[in-house]
Image: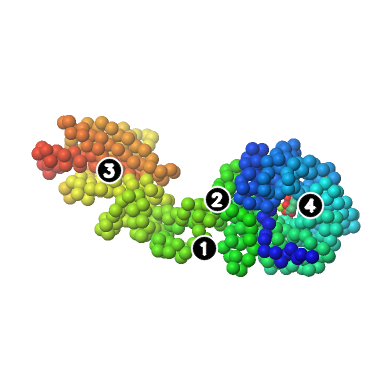
């Protein structure tokens, strides 16, 4: 006899469409299920548990259509331990070239009490239902639900009965996520050693994540001799979910040195299917989720970014390309350093020398302190607005604005004019109007405002607002731009920027207005 537990291939049994869909609120439509099944098939999943055909007409139709549509994967349906469920399941899965009936019953004392069956009565039921399934389908999987809380002797007894009745896969569910890795490995190992006929069947592991140990328990079960892992995309499933497919598959790939078992999964498809399942189920993936989380291959802190730029292996144990990402991401934020900032600026086409980098870095940190993440567009705006600000004659020093209901807006502006700080307090019709009035009071001018435009550079309420201001004075036109998380500050800077440009242009044409000539006594 071949001892299957000695083989190095582990079958991947995906139950996203059955156990995954049992998550409250995760219901998927017929077409979505067909699409996910196609993706699972293409990715190399060995067995797809497509649904529970007796559950509803919709479930039946979905399993049947997935079976009709299947190419490489075996299509399986779930059935309780009764003929009606098994017949209905067969009617759905029989359309697939490779099919399977998965029938189960709760064998622990707690679960035996539900249908009120004695141990002997349940044993008889298992024999007759597995035999019935086997008469219909040549591939039958049987599960003693709540196996990890079932008495050892009884568990061995019912497994032997199921094998004798024709089950070729014996699944050991940890239905309530109760086991732990050492116990999980030991349980499978002892079952294979003890149950007559165990060498001829495949033992499967089906773990739930109630204590956060589903992945560890599944891998331990494989070490104990299981050769099928039951899992779901993103770990979707009842309560805290099932074992996450992407986690066990990547763990076996990355640590093949100590877990020398292979799966047939094309791991480069993991990210795409994870995102699709998240969308159709309405269950977003947590940012720090292993393998497929938004941050799984992202490094924000300066020391990590510097390490990654020098050698990717410093902070990554797998290549992002292996899970279907185009590469590592080094998002910029308040924890980032100069190395990553320079790298990003170069990617965006800005060549920065050491001195310029120093200056940009200060402004970048200032922005990062106010914003969760600094995006590419934020940096572009930062570079553009910083281009010649140091040499400007007019510079914003501070601005406070009070606005809202119950009165006109009031701006208190401190502006440096040729190196001297001046203050103005002005009212206006809204915060921007009050601010522009204050600028005009400190720097009287006849420039006509031709354009005032605001748009958000990136998403979110902390997005930078880019403001463009176009001024015209005696036929001379100047445009100013600025970006800031505060729209009014950005508006003030853009206006001042435009005025500086007007000053430069007029000075070049010999008609410069010398701000030093302004009588500051009149200015409050
Ligand atoms: C651990 C798991 O994931 S098990 C799978 C859980 N998934 C689901 O339950 C999703 C689909 N379920 C359903 O749509 C419905 O529960 C149905 C259609 C299957 C059954 O609906 P109903 O007939 O109204 O029964 P209801 O759901 O109220 O109760 C379950 C019945 O199944 C029985 N039952 C539960 N498990 C099994 C089993 N493995 N074998 C035989 N009978 C079982 C219960 O004893 C109960 O029987 P009763 O109605 O005679 O008291
Ligand atoms: C139906 C069985 C296999 C199940 O999902 C469980 O016990 O968790
Ligand atoms: Mg389950």
Quadrant location, the N terminus:
bottom right
Residue closest to the eye, 91 or 384: 91
Image quadrant where residue 400 sits: top left
- State how far apart marks 3 and 2 are (Cα): 42 Å
Say which mark, if any, is on residue 140. 4
- Is residue 231 placed above or below 470 in the rendered structure? below
Task: State the CA–CA distance, disc 3 to disc 4.
Answer: 72 Å
Q: Which mark is residue 317?
A: 1
Q: Are marks 1 and 4 in contact (CB under 8 Å)?
A: no
* Residue for badge 3: 493
Residue located at (65% from left, 59% from top): 214
Upstream in the sequence, badge 3 or badge 4? 4
Of marks 1 and 3, which one's residue comes earlier in the chain?
Answer: 1
Tell me: 251 left or right of 501: right
Among numbered discs 3 and 2, the one appearing first in the sequence: 2
Badge 4 element: strand
Q: Relative to the observer, which residue lies in front, 219 or 464?
A: 219
Mark 4 close to ligand 2, CB under 8 Å: no
SS state under label 2? helix
Disc 1 residue crowd, few under 14, some 14–19, many 20+, Cα 10 Å: few
The earlier-in-sequence mark between 1 and 4 is: 4
Q: Is mark 3 within 8 Å of ligand 3?
A: no
In space, the residues marked 1 and 3 are separated at their CA atoms by: 45 Å
Q: Residue at x 71, y 42 (%)?
A: 67
Q: Position of residue 454 (x, y in %)?
A: 34, 37
First reached walking from the N terminus: tag 4 or tag 2: 4
The Cα–Cα distance between marks 4 and 2, rounded to whole angstroms, is 31 Å
Reading the image, the residue beneath label 2 is: 271
Which secondary structure lies at badge 3?
helix
Provide residue 338's location: percent of width, then percent of height.
Answer: 34, 59
Dots 1 and 3: beta carbons under 8 Å?
A: no
Crowd class of label 4 (few under 14; some 14 to 19; many from 20; radius 10 Å): many
């Amino acid at each position: 006899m071949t001892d299957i537990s000695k083989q190095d291939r582990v079958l991947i049994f995906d139950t996203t469409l059955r156990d995954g869909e049992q998550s409250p609120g995760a219901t998927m439509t017929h077409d979505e299920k067909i699409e996910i099944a196609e993706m699972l098939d293409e990715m190399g999943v060995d067995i797809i548990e497509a649904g529970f055909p007796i559950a509803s007409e919709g479930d039946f139709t979905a399993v049947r259509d997935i079976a009709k549509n299947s190419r490489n994967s075996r299509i399986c349906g779930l059935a309780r331990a009764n003929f009606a469920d098994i017949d209905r399941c067969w009617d759905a899965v029989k359309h697939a070239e490779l099919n399977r009936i998965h029938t189960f019953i709760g064998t622990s004392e707690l679960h035996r009490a539900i249908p009120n069956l004695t141990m002997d009565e349940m044993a008889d039921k298992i024999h007759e239902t597995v035999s019935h399934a086997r008469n219909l389908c040549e591939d039958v999987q049987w599960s003693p639900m709540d196996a990890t809380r079932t008495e050892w002797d009884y568990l061995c007894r019912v497994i032997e009965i199921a094998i004798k009745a024709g089950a070729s896969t014996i699944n050991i569910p940890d239905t309530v996520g109760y086991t732990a890795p050492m116990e999980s490995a030991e349980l499978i190992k002892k079952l294979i050693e003890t149950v007559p006929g165990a060498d001829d069947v495949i033992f499967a592991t089906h773990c739930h994540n109630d204590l956060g140990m589903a992945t560890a328990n599944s891998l331990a079960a494989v070490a104990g001799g299981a050769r099928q892992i039951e899992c779901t995309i993103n770990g979707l499933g009842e309560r805290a979910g099932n074992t996450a497919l992407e986690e066990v598959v990547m763990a076996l790939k990355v640590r093949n040195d100590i877990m020398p078992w292979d799966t047939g999964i094309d791991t480069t498809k993991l990210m795409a299917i994870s995102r699709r399942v998240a969308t159709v189920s309405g269950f977003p993936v947590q940012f720090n989720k292993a393998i497929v989380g938004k941050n799984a291959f992202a490094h924000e802190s300066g020391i990590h970014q510097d390490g990654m730029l020098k050698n990717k292996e410093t902070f990554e144990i797998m290549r992002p390309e292996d899970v279907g990402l185009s590469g590592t991401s080094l998002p910029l934020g308040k924890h980032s350093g100069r190395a990553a900032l320079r790298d990003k600026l170069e990617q965006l086409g800005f060549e920065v020398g050491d001195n310029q980098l120093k200056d940009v870095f200060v402004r970048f940190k200032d922005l990062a302190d106010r914003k969760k993440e600094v995006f590419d567009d934020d940096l572009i705006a930062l570079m553009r607005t910083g281009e010649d600000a140091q040499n400007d004659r007019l510079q914003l020093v501070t601005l406070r604005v009070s606005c809202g209901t119950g009165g006109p807006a009031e701006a208190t502006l401190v502006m440096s004019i040729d190196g001297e700080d001046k203050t103005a307090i002005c009212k206006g019709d809204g915060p921007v109007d009050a601010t522009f009035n204050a600028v005009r009071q400190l720097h009287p001018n006849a420039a006509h405002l031709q354009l005032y435009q605001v748009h958000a550079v990136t998403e979110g309420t902390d997005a930078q607002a880019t403001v463009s201001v176009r001024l015209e004075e005696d036929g001379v036109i100047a445009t100013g731009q600025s970006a800031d998380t505060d729209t009014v500050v950005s508006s003030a800077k853009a206006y001042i920027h435009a005025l500086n440009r007007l000053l430069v242009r007029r000075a070049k044409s010999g008609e410069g207005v010398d701000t030093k000539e302004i009588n500051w006594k009149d200015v409050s």
